[in-house]
């Protein structure tokens, strides 16, 4: 689904009505955000609150077979409530995925891998705000371990959930290889690039796949 | 769902189609004090509100602040029908300026109560003194973490306490 489809599915009056409701909802969010103490906030805060609301709404619409019909028939506040509930569920699910990722972790002294798995996610779950900053991935610049396949279109908790799912798959793939085998592979890679392998930014599964590819007899 | 909703739903953060009617409905109460606003006055207040919000980099949904200012100041002994609309315009400027100066450390209701009390007592009805002196002192107290931040004369009180002793 793309912008053209959404805008052609809704009439101009329907979009205007939705915008009016979204504005009312934003007013309520601003009051909730300030604990009822202020009806105005800095513009950046208002923009972020608005994007967070839309993130939750979009997360919920994304689970429905016909999101356009839902936008026309269900009040946007109800969509937001359902979306926020879903985002909080995703957060809880991601915590469990993190535990699974740690249980299946690759036994390696590759620092970026261990830092990401331990430190990054610990800080992420402390800082993630599903209500007011659902769309933001805190500390994104420090999520350093590169995945073999990464969904870079996603943001917020949807990205984290996707990342952890992929990491668990990669961990299970890497479990087929011994600790010493992986260490030797990393060491060789580091030597080739004149680097201490422990500080490299590499994906372990990618190196293993490359090694397998090179072992196959050439046609 | 691949749609970027923020590009489809762009909000006009400053609009409030019901604002003028809500402002005019305050005339029911303020007429008791000989004060009333015309539809043109109400529209001008909303325009000032939008300008001041933009100037201070703030967003507010709805016109609640204007209503609260009208309700707080309508019984002031320093406001007459001649200067009512203009005074409200300046109070709107002062309010949003104060929210910025105080870095959102004070609630709307407490700020309006402070402005009303200062205007009526220490400032003797002077809006200039209200903003240039009392609001600045309030902001300084809040930024410095002073507990009794609405007290504009802490030194005088200390002197009185010493005298009593």
Image (cartoon, rainbow, N blue to C red):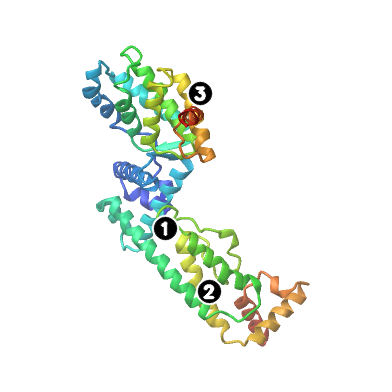
Rendered-image quadrant of the C terminus of chain A: bottom right
Q: Is residue B11 above or below residue B84?
A: below
Q: Residue at x 30, y 32 (%)?
A: B17
Give the Cα distance between marks 3 and 1. Answer: 41 Å
**Residue at label 3?**
B132
A15, A179: nearer the viewer: A179
Q: Position of residue A208 (x, y in %)?
A: 63, 81
Q: How many marks?
A: 3
Residue at 47% over, 26% down: B134
SS at mark 3 in the image: helix
Judged from the image, the secondary structure of the residue bearing numbered disc 2 is helix
Position of A32 compared to B104: left or right?
left
Q: Are marks 2 and 3 on the same chain?
A: no
Identify which residue is drawn at 47% across, 24% down: B131
Please give the label number shown on residue A130.
1
Label 2, label 3: how many angstroms apart (C-alpha)? 59 Å
- Determine which residue is flagged by label 2: A167
Q: Quick one: B92 or B110, which is closer to the camera?
A: B110
The image quadrant that residue B68 belongs to is top left
Q: Chain of mark 1?
A: A
């Amino acid at each position: 689904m793309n912008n053209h489809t959404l805008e052609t599915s809704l009439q101009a009056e329907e979009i205007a009505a939705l915008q009016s409701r979204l504005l009312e909802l934003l007013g309520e969010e601003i009051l909730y955000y300030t604990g009822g103490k202020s009806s105005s906030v800095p513009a950046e805060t208002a923009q972020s609150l608005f994007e967070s609301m839309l993130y939750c709404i979009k997360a919920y619409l994304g689970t429905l077979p016909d999101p356009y019909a839902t936008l026309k028939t269900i009040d946007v506040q109800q969509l937001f409530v359902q979306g926020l509930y879903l985002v909080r569920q995703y957060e809880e699910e991601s915590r469990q995925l993190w535990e699974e990722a740690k249980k299946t972790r690759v036994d390696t002294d590759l620092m970026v891998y261990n830092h990401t798995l331990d430190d990054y996610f610990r800080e992420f779950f402390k800082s993630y705000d599903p209500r007011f900053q659902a769309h933001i991935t805190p500390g994104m610049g420090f999520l350093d371990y590169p995945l073999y396949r990464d969904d870079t279109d996603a943001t917020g908790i949807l990205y984290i959930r996707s990342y952890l799912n992929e990491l668990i798959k990669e961990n299970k793939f890497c479990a087929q290889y011994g600790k010493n085998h992986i260490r030797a592979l990393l060491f060789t890679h580091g030597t080739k690039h004149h680097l201490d392998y422990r500080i490299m930014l590499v994906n372990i599964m990618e190196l293993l796949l490359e090694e397998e590819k090179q072992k196959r007899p050439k046609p | 769902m691949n749609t970027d909703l923020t590009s489809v739903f762009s909000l006009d953060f400053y609009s409030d189609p019901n604002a003028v009617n809500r402002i005019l409905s305050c005339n029911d109460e303020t007429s008791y004090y000989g004060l009333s606003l015309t539809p043109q006055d109400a529209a001008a207040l909303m325009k000032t509100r939008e300008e001041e919000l933009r100037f201070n980099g703030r967003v507010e949904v709805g016109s609640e602040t204007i209503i609260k200012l009208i309700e707080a100041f309508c019984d002031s002994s320093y406001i007459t029908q001649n200067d009512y609309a203009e005074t409200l315009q300046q109070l709107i400027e002062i309010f949003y300026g104060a929210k910025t100066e105080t870095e959102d450390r004070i609630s709307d209701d407490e700020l309006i109560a402070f402005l009303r009390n200062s205007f009526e007592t220490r400032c003797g009805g002077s809006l200039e003194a209200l903003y240039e002196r009392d609001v600045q002192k309030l902001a300084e107290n809040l930024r410095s973490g002073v507990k009794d931040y609405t007290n504009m004369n802490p030194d005088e009180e200390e002197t009185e306490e010493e005298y009593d002793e």
